[in-house]
Image (cartoon, grey):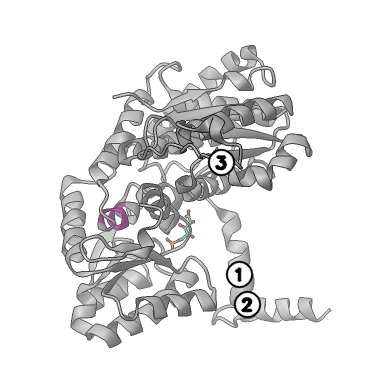
Amino acid sequence: MKNLSIDISKAFGFVSENDYKALQNKALECNAALYDKNLPGNDFLGWADVKNIISEDELSQIEAKAAELRKKIDVLVVIGIGGSYLGAKAVIEALSNSFVQMNPKKGNPIILFAGQNIGEDYISELMDAIADRSYALCVISKSGTTTEPAIAFRLLKAKIEEKYGKAEAANRIVAITDKSRGALRTLADSEGYKTFVIGDTVGGRFSVLTPVGLFPIAVAGFDIRQLLQGAYDIEAISQKGKSFDENIPAHYAVVRNLLYQKKFSTEILVNFHPKLHYFSEWWKQLYGESEGKDGKGIFPASVDFTSDLHSMGQYIQEGVRLMYETVISIAEPDRKVEIPSDAQNLDQLNFLAGKRVDFVNKQAELGTQLAHLDGGVPQIRIEIPKLNEYYLGQMIYFFEKACGISGYILGVNPFNQPGVEAYKKNMFALLDKPGYEEASKAIRARLAK
Ligand code: PA5
């Protein structure tokens, strides 16, 4: 089967081919470190050996529980935040009919999300929306102690128990968490929920190919084995010992580091298909949390074109020159729609009659690439033949592997996220959480000044 392809030729001119060649060995060393586990973050590399990320037994259990729920529910509410949310959301959004929420039905439940924010209207409206539906909950937290999903789960647990009674509610709740630690593990064991484990060696943002992503994706009705197969096939060409030419994630890792060295400090992930919106959100977390530390790192941003050509397009074309773009292009969409001829032709579009909508989209893509190049914006282009489980699996592993290599080239530990704690400390102090008494006093004194 054809693989995802990457074209970096439009970055040359901004970075030199000599510099590109000079960094290749370093990239291969960094790739090897993901297998040899000899650089910082080495206890969070379980995702790299993707063939062993999940056992056959666990996969079968995920498929069985998903099939059981699919028979009886209209809606699955997935509760989680960050890495415990974005992977499933990205894949489900990419594979679903764009209007699936207009027709939730048994046998093909829709997936809603909670605990990814603390919006009071959001959770209240969600509880109203599912009240008369047949639903189940999937609560995901590696630590088992994250505030946002814990609040959402407390609220939704009370609702589901009120609706179905405690015993049936327990059948309709699945918890995905650590094998032995954390409040969610204690609760799940005491209430008898079906559980799946997030392994110790996989951090949240690298967890989409574990039960964290696979279970919600399976309930949505998508083929998780194909998703994994796509990942396996990119791992096979980027294993330790593979040549630089074969290792396409390394190409991306090298070129983005060279662009960063030339002061292109923002990378914009671009799509021309709205179904990829949340894929970009997943990618932003992956790169933002992995590389943004020690005063370093490319700022990951994203746009949905052509929509955002009518908002951000102006800045990208003519604003401060600090960004490059990585465009994800889908060679062939699922549907075919031709633009009809019109007798009156008042909109003067008859020159497009008989052409596919995707043909227009592709010309927009090419025209934008050339315009942005002329505007001084280096271009990387990634193409997949189709948007399906297999190629999403390829893209997921491609970006994960490239992220590990890229972070090591940059000289950071790509697998920690110490900066995420700062807001939590302040929030807990302001909420008078037990144990934060001194911090509460300090923050109040600071606010009173
Ligand atoms: O990537 C990460 O580690 C984070 O985004 C976490 O996934 C996020 O904070 C949620 O954590 P947890 O799964 O422990 O609730």
User: Mark 3 vs ligand 1: CB under 8 Å?
Assistant: no
Point out the tag, 2 or 3, that comes first from the N-terminus: 3
What is the quadrant of residue 371 in the picture? top right
Q: Residues within 10 Å of mark 2 (few under 14, many from 20)?
A: many
Residue wearing tag 3: 344
**307 sits left or right of 276 in the view:** right
Q: Is 353 covered by the magenta stretch?
A: no
Q: Secondary structure at mark 2?
A: helix
Q: What's the residue at 35%, 47% (across, down)?
A: 95
Look at label 2 and name its amino acid.
Ala
- The local secondary structure at tag 1 comes to helix
Dot 1 corresponds to which residue?
Answer: 425
How many discs mark residues in the rendered view?
3
Residues under labels 1 and 3: Cα distance? 65 Å
Tell me which corner region of the image, top left, top right, bottom left or bottom right, holds residue 299.
Answer: top right
What distance separates the C-alpha of mark 2 from that of mark 3? 67 Å
Residue lying furthest right: 449
Instruction: Say what secondary structure mark 3 lies in.
Output: loop
Can residue 192 be spotted in the picture? no
Q: As rendered, which of 4 and 31 lies closer to the eye?
A: 4
Of residues 423 and 311, the one nearer the viewer is 311
Labelled pair 2, 3 in contact (Cβ < 8 Å)? no
Splitting the image into 4 quarters, where does residue 219 fall? Answer: bottom left
Residue 216 painted magenta: yes
Q: Are marks 2 and 1 in contact (CB under 8 Å)?
A: yes
> Which residue is disc 2 drawn over?
429
The type of residue carrying mark 3 is: Gln
Characterize the local packing of mark 1: few (<14), some (14-19) or many (20 or more) Cα atoms within 10 angstroms.
some
Could you tell me residue 307's position as x and y percent? 59, 46
Q: Is residue 34 left or right of residue 230?
A: right
On the rendered image, what quadrant is the N terminus found in?
A: top left
- Magenta segment boundaries in residue numbering: 214-218
